[in-house]
Each structure stands twice: as C-alpha cells, then as structure tokens.
Amino acid sequence: MANDGSGTVNLTVNLSASRAKVASIMLLDSVNGYKVPTKQTIQKEMDEIVAYLKKSKGISNVKKKVDFDNYIVSLSFAFEQVSNINNINQSVLKKLKINAVNNSSYSYNLASSTFQRNYTHTKEAVIQYNKLKPAVKNVFKEATYTSIYRFEKPVVSSTNPLAKVSKSKKAILLNTGILGLINGKTNISNQIILSK
C-alpha cells in the first residue's frame, strides 16, 4: 500500500503442492458428488471476474493468470483507496456462485497512518463446513490462509499476535490454518500503525 492509501491486491490460490492429485481430479466429471469444473469453465469464470472488477469503482489494472500445469490461479488489481476493496471478495464469491458471508472490512486513516482489517467470524462457515462429506473435509486439514501486507512506510505496531513484521519493517505476514478460521478459533483482524 502506498502512503496515500492506494495500492494493489494480489490474490492467489496455489494448489501446486497437490498438483498430481488435482490433475487426476480434473480428468473426472465429479468427485464425492461435486461437479469438477473443466479448464474452459475455470477460464470463463476468471474472465467474468476480471470483467466485473474492471467495472468496479476505484479498481483498475486488473490482471489474471491461470496456470494449469502447476494449478495456480492469480488475480491482481490496483485500488485508489482501501475502501474500494471492501465487498470485492464478497462480490467475486457471489459471481462464482459460492455462498459466503462478508466478514472482513478494510480501512486506512491517512492522518494517523493506521491500516485496519476487521474480521468477524460467522457461524455460517461452520454450518457449511459441517455439511461437507468427510472426504471433502479432509482437504481443509492441510489448507492454509496467508496474507501479506506491504507498505511504503515502516510498521510501528501490529495488534494481531499471529502477524510477523518483516526485517525491513515494511511488510506483515499472517499465516494460519483454514480450519481455525472456519471454526472461529483464529482471528485475522489487525490494526497496523505505520510511521508518520
């Protein structure tokens, strides 16, 4: 994020650690009662997301990358101000027909140089997880969530004990298991104060 509150977002789904398993699943029509999307369907849905983001207020420079050799999907875009990214995740999930609850909001106070992510766990995540078949639930055992925030100014403080500040003090890493987020045992809220 730049000093004025503008910046870029890079979202990545990386299944490369399970590349062989994913490749074999992609050859099937369905797994455990769930339809397996074709490469063409994935490309089409990514194109729809890109088109949607290009029309979103304060969003520009939208790019996607789909790597079917390593099973890595990336989406990046620039934002004019932090508030432009609120509801983007929700809108993208809705476009993908994934029922999710918006449980994060982002803000940046220029005067106090404070970046904030507010995260609220919702019971809906547990309800949806509990509806899954055991074989599908196993996928989440090793899954992780990683967020990295990069800033032009050095970080003075961070309120989340899971967050690690880089040696340069210009980035924060938060890495946690997905199950902790689903079950509400992990909170990824963070207030990051930058030097003035």
Image: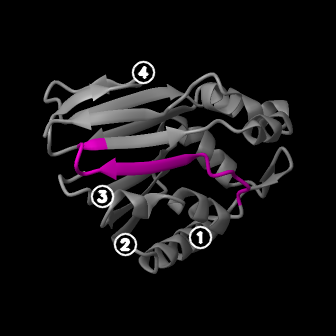
First in sequence: mark 3 vs mark 1: 3
Q: Which residue is mark 3?
A: 8
- Which is nearer the N-term, disc 3 or disc 2? 3
Residues in magenta, as a range: 98-114
| Residue placed furthest toward the front | 111
Vertical arrangement, residue 56 with respect to residue 104, above or below: below
Q: Report the Cα–Cα distance between label 4 and label 3.
A: 23 Å
The answer to whether the residues at label 2 and label 4 have Cβ atoms under 8 Å apart is: no
Q: Is residue 66 visible?
A: no
> Residue at position x 66%, y 27% from top?
184
Q: Is residue 166 magenta?
A: no
Give the mark toward the camera: 3 or 2.
2
Callout 4: 10 Å neighbours few (<14), some, many (20+)?
A: some
Q: Label 1: state its secondary structure.
A: helix
Label drawn at residue 148: none
Separation of marks 1 and 2 at Cα, in angstroms: 22 Å
Amino acid type shown at disc 3: Thr
Q: Is residue 31 visible?
A: yes
Q: Which residue is mark 1?
A: 45
- The residue at the point 68 percent across, 55 percent down is 27
Q: CA distance from mark 3 to mark 2?
A: 11 Å
